[in-house]
Structure formats: C-alpha cells, structure tokens
Image (cartoon, grey):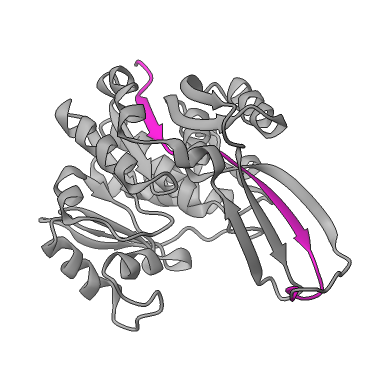
Amino acid sequence: MSKPRITVVGSFAVGLTIRAPNIPVFGVTMLGSSFDMGPGGKGSNQAVATARLGADSSLVAIIGQDKFADIAMDLYQTEGVRTAHVKQSAESPTAVGFIILNERGENFIIMDYGATNAMDRAFVDRAESCIRESDVVMAVLEPPVEVAMRTMELGRKHGKITVLNPAPAAPLPDEIFPLVDYLTPNESELRILLGLRPDDPRPSRELVELLRRRGAANVIVTLGDRGVLVVTNTIDEAIPTAEVEVVDTTGAGDAFNSGFAVALAEGWDVINAARFGVCCGALVCTKLGVIPGMATRRAADEMYRTLFA
C-alpha cells in the first residue's frame, strides 16, 4: 500500500517558555526558571505528526533566514517532511511565541507570526501541484485567512479531501464553508466562529447546528477530556476520549487532526477516522512537549485496536 499524501498549509514557530511565580506586570523584573525552547506552529506540528503516522507529508509555509529557521529545517529532515514549498525569507524573522507560565499553570503568550504574515493566495498557488497530488489537504488559521480560503479552493478544485482546523479561531466568510469537507474546531473556537464569547454557555451540539446552517456540512468538535463530537448529514455521534495519564495537553488538537487526516487519506470512514484521531490526541498528552509526544503509527494502531477494534 502506497503512503497517503497530505499537504498542510500553515506555519512554523519557535516557542520560548519560562516559568515565573506570577504573570509579570509592566516595569517589573522577576526571576524565572525552567526555560524551554522548541519547535511549534500548528501547521508544522500537523505536518510532523502526519509524517510520523506514515503519511507522505508536505508543508507549505514561510520561515525566516535565521537560527530559528534552522530548527525548522533540521526537524523536517529528521521527521521526513517534504519542504519544497517551505520558503525562507530574509525580509521577516521566523515566527516566535513567548510563553510565561505561573505556578498555577496559567499562561501569558505573545506571538509574532513574522514571516508567516507574508503568506498570501499567490504563495498557495505556487504549491498547487503539491495539492493536486495529495489525498488530503489541511489548513489552519495562523497564516492570513485568505491563505486558508485559497487552500480549500484548490483542494476542492482537484477533488481532494479538505480539512480546516480553524485555529487560532478567527472570523471566517461564509464562502469558505462549502469548500471544507471537515471543519474541526474545539469548543471555544466553535463559539468564536459564530461571533460568540469563547465561554458561551449554550451546548456545543446546539451551536454546531448554527454553524452547519452557514454551510459547514461536516463538523467535528474536539471536546478535550470528553472526546469528540461528530456531526454530518447522517451522523450525530459523540466519541469518548481515551483514558491516559495526562502529563501535558499541549498539541492535543494538532495530534487529533493529524490522526484524523491520515485515516481519511487511507480511506477510513469518518467515525473510525475520528476514533483514530482520538487515540493520537490522547497519546500526545502522555509526554511533555508537542513534538516528543506526537504518536508513532505503532503506538496509535495499538491504542486503536485496544479501544475500538
């Protein structure tokens, strides 16, 4: 069986994390600890995760020409991610995120998307041949919204399965929804897409129906430790999460989307693809750090057989 081919249009960013007693206020210098620096970016995470699960994965992104860009290229070489459409630009730095964690686990994050902001429709067009040869085409919302729109347009043009992970959530034009085969928000993103507060108390199932009326035919909502909700024209099913010892939930959404996409690319039906995604999302929570925690195919298959076979 040939490898499924997946193209991810997104971003790479380096996360710089430090722990501090409290979230700082302006003008105050404090001592921190446990500094960590590592690769991130939702598009990059998903390209790495799909490759680790056995897909022939390509990333479409722009990074800088700096030391942080070296981290990206070293990662892709190690993980087997295709980089023909990863552009290095001298005009802007590689995206970075500064994360401060306090003793209660609350965080304060400042992002600079840097070179990612230079992505546009024309840049996606240059990757059309890659999209045409893919089984599944994925996009996130770290680049400008027009980039996700064009990705979905080209995926639909060439008859590919299109998956839009609307994260970080941003207002979207209704015109994008008919182009998306599977929309995969989490609960707060679902609400933001509808122009609501992220903590709106209405049930997610009720809100899914409002989104479907705007043209989103198939909505898969990740529910954290409560699993996943799958709603299509013929399916309305909640899939429970896998019970694991949680170490770090960072990257669980990226892991779910990656497992879901790989399974779809291999021809699985939506329910079993979502179950496989649940396994991948659970496994990433068992280790500290996103890239170290992303599942191997053997581990994901083993958990799937244990839970669902």
Give the farthest residue toward the right: 31
The image quarter in which residue 258 lies: top left
Residue 120 belongs to the span the image colors magenta: no
- Residue at 46 percent across and 32 percent down: it is 61
Residue 141 in sight here: yes
The image quarter in which residue 128 lies: top left
Residue 6 belongs to the span the image colors magenta: yes
Give the farthest residue toward the front: 91
The x, y position of residue 257, in whole percent, is 40, 46
Q: In the image, is 228 to the left or to the right of 117? A: left
The correct choice, above or below, for 270 with respect to 61 in the image is: below
Residue 53 in sight here: no
- Residue at 26 percent across and 37 percent down: it is 150
The stretch of residues the image draws in magenta is 2-25
The x, y position of residue 43, in whole percent, is 47, 40
- Residue at 25 percent across and 47 percent down: it is 182
- Residue at 45 percent across and 37 percent down: it is 118
Q: In the image, is 92 to the left or to the right of 142? A: right
Q: Quadrant of the N terminus?
A: top left
The x, y position of residue 236, in whole percent, is 19, 62
Q: Of 268 and 91, which appears nearest the observer? A: 91
Q: Of 31 and 104, which appears nearest the observer? A: 31
Q: Quadrant of the C terminus?
A: top left
Q: Of 203 and 285, which appears nearest the observer? A: 203
Q: In the image, is 238 to the left or to the right of 43? A: left
The x, y position of residue 203, in whole percent, is 29, 78
The correct choice, above or below, for 128 with respect to 180 in the image is: above
Count of marks placed on residues: 0
